[in-house]
C-alpha cells in the first residue's frame, strides 16, 4: 500500500499498541520501556504503557503485533531535482521507493543534477528558492524533502545569503561543488550562511560531479561547515589520517554515506566512538549518484556499521534518526512527546541468524519493514523492498 503524494497532516487520533520494542532515536536512552504511542494532528501526544495512555476515540489504530517501532529514518545527504524524478539515472519514483526503505525525511545537499544548472548568482538563488518552494508543497509518497540548497559560487556577497534566508532557504549545498574551494573564501561564506540561519555542508574527498574538486582536511577545517559531508568520500575518500584529523579537530557533524568508501566509513565511526562523540555521526546515501538509487541505502548502512563497527544496532539507528534531527534542527527523528509522528515499524527478517531484531541487524541482516507512517498518516504497509519479516503490524481502522 502506497498513498498519494501530499503534505497533508493526520486528522484525529492515531494509536499504535502492542509494540514489542520501542527505539527512541536518542543515544542517551535508545530503548524505551513502552508499548504504546499516541499521536494527534501529526504530533506525538503520549507514549508509555497502554494502561497509562489515553487511547479512547482513536480514529486509526495499529496493532504492532510485537514488532519494533523506531523514528522514521532520515537521509542526511540526497540530491533531488524536481518531483520524484532524477535525471542522474533518468528514474521515476525513487523517493517513493526509499519510503519502502523506511526513509521519511530527506535533506538536500544541493540540486546539482539539474540539467543546465545555473551557476550565475541570480540563477543559483532562483533555483534554490524554486526547489525550496516545490518540495515544501509536494511530498512524494509523503516523504519530507528539505530542499533548496544552493551551491555557492565566487562573487557572492553577504546580501545574497540574507536574500536566501528571507526567501525561506535554510540550507547550503555542498561547499566545493562550485567555484568556492579555498578554505578562507569558503569560511567567509559559511559564516554569512550561519549568520542568517542557513546550515552548511562541505564536500569531502575527491571530485564527483563536473566542477567539483579535491577537498582535503585542511580545507574542511578552515571552512568550518556544519556538516563534514560524506567524510568517507563521495566517492573517493581522504586518507585515514586526514579523516582522524577531521574527527579530532572540530566538533561538527560527521556524515557517513552509503555511496562512499566503506573502510573510511567504518574508521570514522570508530574514531567518533573512541572520542566518545557518537552523537556527531549522521548517515546519508549521497544518492542519486552514478551508482544509482539505493532505496535500502540507509538500512544497509545501519546493518553494515552495526555488524562491523562494534556499535550496538540501537545506537547506530540513532545515527540515522535523532542524531541527524538534532544536528539539522528538525522536529522529527525522536520518539518524544511533541515531535512529528514519523514512525517505522519493523521486525527481524525471516530466517535471519539473529534471534531478534537488534541481534539480526548486528549480524548484518536487513530488517523487514511492515509499515511506515509520516506525520501520523500510514504511507505504506509491508515494504516491497525489504525481506519479509517474522511479524507485521496490522491496520485495524
Image: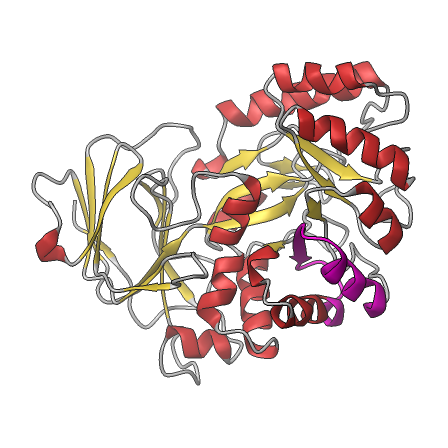
Q: Nearer the viewer, residue 156 or 55?
A: 156
Q: Quadrant of residue 7?
A: top left
Residue drawn at the location 54% of the way across and 49% of the way down: 324
User: Does residue 340 sit above or below 357 in this rendering?
Assistant: above
- Reply yes or no: does residue 249 show up in magenta: yes
Residue drawn at the location 84% of the way across and 21% of the way down: 156
Residue 97 visible from this viewpoint: no
Residue drawn at the location 61% of the way across and 78% of the way down: 308
Q: Nearer the viewer, residue 158 or 99?
A: 158
User: Does residue 277 sit above or below 3 in this rendering?
Assistant: below
Pinpoint residue 125: horizontal percent, then vertical percent. 74, 19
Q: Is residue 283 left or right of residue 220?
A: left
Residue drawn at the location 73% of the way across and 35% of the way down: 173
Which quadrant: the C terminus? top left
Q: How many marks can you see?
A: 0
Q: Nearer the viewer, residue 367 or 216?
A: 216
Pinpoint residue 314: horizontal percent, then vertical percent. 44, 67
Residue 233 visible from this viewpoint: yes
Q: Is residue 75 left or right of residue 390?
A: right
- Reply yes or no: does residue 68 show up in magenta: no
User: Does residue 152 sit above or below 90 in this rendering?
Assistant: above
Q: Is residue 3 left or right of residue 90?
A: left
Pinpoint residue 120: horizontal percent, then vertical percent. 86, 19
How is this picture coloured? Answer: secondary structure
Start-end of magenta stretch: 240-264
Pinpoint residue 200: horizontal percent, then vertical percent. 70, 37
Amino acid at each position: 500500500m502506497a498513498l498519494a503524494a501530499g503534505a497533508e497532516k493526520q486528522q484525529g487520533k492515531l494509536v499504535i499498541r502492542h509494540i514489542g520494542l520501542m527505539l527512541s532515536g536518542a543515544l542517551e536512552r535508545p530503548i524505551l520501556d513502552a508499548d504504546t504511542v499516541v499521536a494527534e494532528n501529526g504530533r506525538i501526544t503520549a507514549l508509555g504503557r497502554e494502561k497509562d495512555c489515553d487511547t479512547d476515540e482513536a480514529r486509526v489504530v495499529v496493532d504492532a503485533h510485537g514488532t519494533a517501532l523506531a523514528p522514521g529514518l532520515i537521509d542526511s545527504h540526497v540530491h533531488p531535482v524536481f518531483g520524484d524524478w532524477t535525471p542522474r539515472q533518468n528514474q521515476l519514483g525513487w523517493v517513493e521507493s526509499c519510503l519502502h526503505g523506511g526513509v521519511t525525511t530527506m535533506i538536500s545537499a544541493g540540486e546539482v543534477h539539474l540539467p543546465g544548472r545555473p551557476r550565475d548568482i541570480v540563477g543559483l538563488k532562483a533555483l534554490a528558492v524554486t526547489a525550496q518552494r516545490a518540495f515544501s508543497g509536494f511530498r512524494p509518497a509523503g516523504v519530507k524533502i528539505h530542499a533548496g540548497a544552493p551551491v555557492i559560487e565566487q562573487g557572492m556577497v553577504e546580501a545574497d545569503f540574507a536574500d536566501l534566508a528571507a526567501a525561506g532557504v535554510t540550507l547550503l549545498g555542498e561547499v566545493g561543488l562550485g567555484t568556492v574551494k579555498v578554505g578562507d573564501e569558503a569560511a567567509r561564506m559559511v559564516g554569512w550562511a550561519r549568520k542568517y540561519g542557513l546550515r552548511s555542508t562541505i564536500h569531502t574527498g575527491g571530485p564527483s560531479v563536473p566542477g567539483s574538486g579535491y577537498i582535503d582536511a585542511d580545507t574542511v577545517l578552515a571552512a568550518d561547515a556544519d556538516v563534514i559531508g560524506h567524510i568517507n568520500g563521495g566517492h573517493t575518500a581522504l586518507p585515514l589520517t586526514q579523516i582522524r584529523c577531521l574527527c579530532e579537530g572540530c566538533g561538527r557533524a560527521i556524515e557517513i554515506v552509503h555511496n562512499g568508501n566503506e573502510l573510511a566509513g567504518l574508521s570514522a565511526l570508530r574514531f567518533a566512538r573512541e572520542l566518545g562523540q557518537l552523537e556527531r555521526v549522521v548517515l546519508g546515501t549521497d544518492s542519486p549518484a552514478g551508482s544509482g538509487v539505493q532505496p535500502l541505502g540507509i538500512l544497509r548502512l545501519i546493518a553494515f556499521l552495526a555488524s562491523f563497527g562494534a556499535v550496538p544496532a540501537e545506537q547506530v539507528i540513532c545515527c540515522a534518526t535523532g542524531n541527524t534531527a538534532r544536528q539539522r534542527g528538525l522536529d522529527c527523528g525522536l520518539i518524544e512527546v511533541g515531535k512529528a509522528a514519523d514512525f517505522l515499524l519493523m521486525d527481524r527478517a525471516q530466517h535471519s541468524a539473529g534471534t531478534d531484531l537488534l541481534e539480526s541487524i548486528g549480524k548484518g541482516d536487513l530488517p523487514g519493514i511492515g509499515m511506515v507512517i509520516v506525520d501520523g498518516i500510514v504511507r505504506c504497509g509491508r515494504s516491497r523492498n525489504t525481506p519479509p519479516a517474522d511479524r507485521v503490524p496490522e491496520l485495524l481502522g
